[in-house]
Image: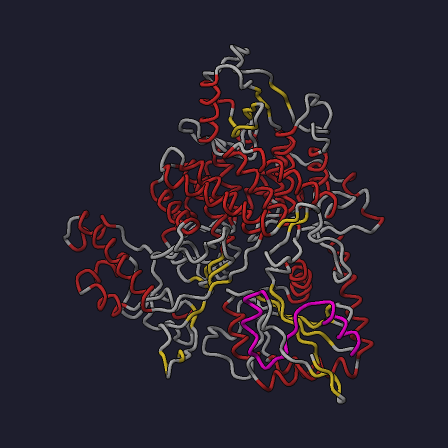
Amino acid sequence: MVEGNAGLHLQNALAESPSPYLRAHKDNPVAWQEWSDATLALAKQHQRLIFLSIGYHACHWCHVMEHESFSSPEIADLLNEFFIPIKLDRETRPDLDDIYMSYVTATTGSGGWPLNVFLTPDLKPVFGGTYWPGPSPSSSVKQATPAGDDAPVTIIDILHKMRDVWTNQREKCIQSSIDITNQLRAFAAEGIHSQTNTQSQGNESDTAEPLEIDLLDDALEHFISRYDSVHGGFSASVTAPKFPTPSNLTFLLRIGAAIAQPSTHTRFGFFSPVPGILGTPSCTKAASMSLHTLLAMSRSGLRDQLGYGFHRYSVTPDWNLPHFEKMMCDNAQLLGCYCDAWALGRDPEILGTIYNLVEYFTNSDSPIVAPQGGWYASEDADSNPSLPKLANGVPASEDKKEGAYYVWTYKELQAILGERDAAIVARHFGVKLDGNVPAEHDIHDEFLTQNVLHIEATPSVLAKEFGVPEEEIVQIIKSGRTKLLEHRKSKREHPSIDTKILASWNGLAIAALSRAANTLATIDKTRARACQEAAEKAATFIRREMYDESTGRLSRTPDSQAAFVDDYAYLILGLLSLYDLTLAQPYLDWAIQLQKYVDGHFASTTGGYFQAEASAEQIIRLKPGTDNSLPSPNGIICTNLLYLASYCQSASPSTATTADGHNYLGKAKGILDAFAVEIIQHPFLFVSLLACVVMQEVGAKTLIAPMTTRDSELRRLKGWGRTVVKGLVPEVMICTREGVCRPLKQSDLEDVDDEPDEGVVGASVDTTSKS
């Protein structure tokens, strides 16, 4: 930044940013600044509006706006002369993203990325939106604007207007920003994003109705009413984008498991009295909706049918036209969902998807696997259609296109596979000569003749259609997949990778891989071992590179970016999952240390936990309670606390305090009380917390088995434990002097003596919280 005699002259400052998303804007003529104390001070000093643009590396529409608008000298001149332009990576600052997204959704009725907001020098929002067309909208704009933002103005119109308003109506603009911020604070104080520091809400939870398990019924009815019985999934309308939302699928799977006929030692989910409240038909419906959805997704274009994993969401109800970014956090959560689905139905197709996701997280050639341990954040949606050609030793630039790495023409299949095999593979993957992307979703013909691969015909169907034995069809498809994948790797440019390693998302992956290791322990020991090794390697990396042993403070990224409550919540979940898997005491000890830090730095005096530690740059301090694309941090903390209470319960269960001096049950109850009003009003938005309501009401039991006698019998119990899927309501946990085994259910202990015979079974302790 350089200040001359004529005023402030800014220079682009993103070249050295640790964020790949920010570095991608280093060559823009816009003089982008990072969010920092120095930049914010500059806005105050010169009394300029801040233009805050928030996005993430894999976001397609972020790339569109960067190309159309932020590469434009005309727009750069306006931004540089009259504003303080700040670029922000939403994945490194979720607190700021949530604050200003709350503003935009409240004022426009929709949200998304890129998120663009004008702020006063004291950070209060004045005006905002998502994608705004540039001077010459790109052909990649499939509609006039993205879904939910149909304003017929360009960014140039908006910049001129905001410049004039700030110049000529500044006092009115400032007062409006104050009023809006006060409204946001009042909204946050209501509880969905609860905020303290007001006297009126101190006793709000005292007047709330008690949380009852029958809220499950209300939540289930919501999902039933929005269920797509044809394609699976849930959506408010047939035109809305469709997201997997793994938290909701997990919730439904666990309801379904309540009445499932279990195979040996694989029960998980909600237990009595849940089936009695919902009824068998409702539990069956929950199971069928979730299984249908997961199978439909696995066969669809949402899944990369040649490579690894799933894309983020689909713009069509049949899941077959995704926006092509791949998010590590989505795939980690989906791995857990498919493990739950396998336990519920033992469907071989589900197991195949588990294998695919396990490969994504454990293979050294996977684009998201970090060699030092852990996983990268995402794969981009856009890429060049082919490898860049060299011109005088310099790669020639092409316009990147959305989905270019993943789509195919029928002629490409013919050239690679030959006429006969191409016909069979094309029929299997739904490839058409004129393309399979619906015209209404391709108004600019960007996907003309292009095809998104999805499973359209099974080998048995193809055998009848082509008069070829089914075994030969299977081999043709297998060979075709291999050849297409090799062509894709060797001839096309791979989408760029966001190499950030986030503590929060890695915690979700550690939990998922620990879960997968349990699922595969008796099915595929090699893959199970790979899951455990990858999870432990990631935990070791995070502790070494992203944790300060002296302070107990976690970093969100290896470059010491301060961690948020989701980093702690998800990592603790991963460590508890690793502890369940390995019984290694250090994982439990570290989880307890992290929870202690959370209690000391994020806890609210009225219950629940704030998203961030207190900071002057936050105009609102939010408490994240709802489940969205990521699970509720408060819901996960509540789950962690309930498990820590079970693991650490003292010999006097009448007191809520554990042997290590922590009141885990009391803190869990405090979270539920803090969100009680909102859970009762909208239970379907709080499925993670709703699961904790069940666990709190039903409770857990601890079965103590001394290590000194009948060692072989104890090993048998521990072996059972490793095959039992961890649900949210374990009825029995097997404990030894050395640690806690995997949770077991009462039905798994039918051949274990009720009395302490030779030291196998000791005492049963009820830890149900009724206070």
Where is residue 228 drawn, in percent x and y? 45, 51
- Between 91 and 707, which is closer to the camera in this rendering? 707
Please say if 753 is above or below 543: above
Where is residue 463 drawn, in percent x and y? 19, 51
Q: Which residues are magenta?
A: 18-46
Judge whether residue 744 can be spotted in this image: yes
Q: Is residue 426 left or right of residue 393?
A: left
- Between 477 and 718, which is closer to the camera in this rendering? 718
Q: How many marks?
A: 0
Q: How is the image coloured?
A: secondary structure
Q: Name the image quarter holding residue 607.
A: top right
Q: Is residue 101 left or right of residue 179?
A: left
Residue that appears at 22% across and 69% down: 415
Where is residue 271 drawn, in percent x and y? 54, 29
Q: Assess whether residue 32 is covered by the magenta stretch.
A: yes
Residue located farthest toward the right when viewing the structure as drawn = 199
Please say if 365 is above or below 180: above
Residue located farthest toward the bottom when viewing the structure as drawn = 6
